[in-house]
Image: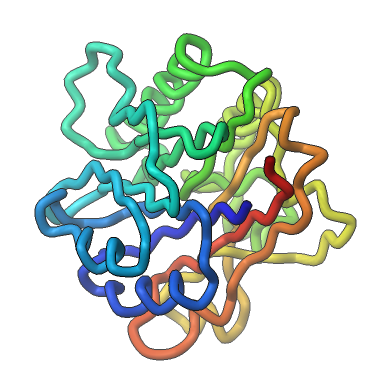
Amino acid sequence: MRIVTWNVNSIRARRERALAWVTQHQPDVIALQELKTTDEAFPTDDFAALGYHAVTWGQKTYNGVALLSRTQPTDVVRGFDDGVDDPQARFIAATFEGVRVCCGYFPNGGEPDSDKYQYKRAWLGRLDAWLDDHASADEALVLCGDFNIAPDASDVCNVNAWEGTVLFNPEMRAAFRGLLDWGLTDSFRLQDDHDVVFSWWDYRRLAFVRNQGLRIDHLLVTEPLVARVERVWVDRAERKGESPSDHAPVVLDMRWP
């Protein structure tokens, strides 16, 4: 089974690239973030022509998440359903062939002293509560998406430059560890090859050319899937060319069932 996470930074801007990538790599499930469009405007028919079902939770201009799959999804959930009045479309989950896939577009946080950062902190707490109430570390589950958190010093291009930012600080690293303590494993770290690999590069200052990026896009798996992971890789090639997203797809290949 191939499960992919990719922040497309506008599906309308990246429509042709996304369709071409799916055609080439044939994922079983692809989790998309930052759609920046409504459900009605999502190119559902285009992906259907390639043999994919689409479940979306869109939002005009901002945010938005989707799950595309070869098989019909079941038990679709949009949002945390926790009674919080939150208009931001950032979380969607569904089950595919016995694997629960949860896709999140985690808040960026703006600046550490901003309201946006307080929202990020609260959102992470709501995710923790949702996992406690609606998921189990004993089931086959993948939590993936743009986490907007670099969990380790090896996941940032320049520790001194990034330390203390909303993407890399002690509190966010602790929040990431909290997800691991719940029962998730960073699938990327299961590999013997620990070369520095990033998944996001700023559009500015030739960051991609200089490989000045961060690893903030993750696929976390529960124990039933750990031994089934075969490879996790970042498709840097998709970050090249004309009008790419600032994120590259991150691919999890595993044996399932």
Q: Which residue is nearer to you in this view: 7 or 161?
A: 7
Q: In this view, does 173 lie to the left or right of 4?
A: right
Q: Tell me if 151 is positioned left or right of 113 in this view.
A: right
Q: Position of residue 162 (x, y in %)?
A: 58, 55
Compared with 107, 141 (above or below) is above
On screen, residue 77 versus residue 85, left or right, reads right
Q: Give x and y (percent) for residue 218.
A: 58, 48
Q: Which residue is drawn at 66% across and 36% down?
A: 221
Give the quarter of the figure containing the C terminus.
top right
The image quarter containing residue 79 is: top left
**Residue 36, position in %: x, y?**
21, 56
Q: Residue at x 46, y 66 (%)?
A: 247
Q: Position of residue 138 (x, y in %)?
A: 68, 18
Q: Nearer the viewer, residue 121 or 6?
A: 6
Q: How is this picture coloured?
A: rainbow
Q: Name the residue located 28 percent from the left edge and 61 percent from the top edge.
A: 48
In this picture, is 43 found above or below 1? below
Closer to us: 203 or 162 = 203
Q: Which residue is drawn at 47% across and 9% down?
A: 133
Residue at the outermost bottom position? 241
* Image label count: 0
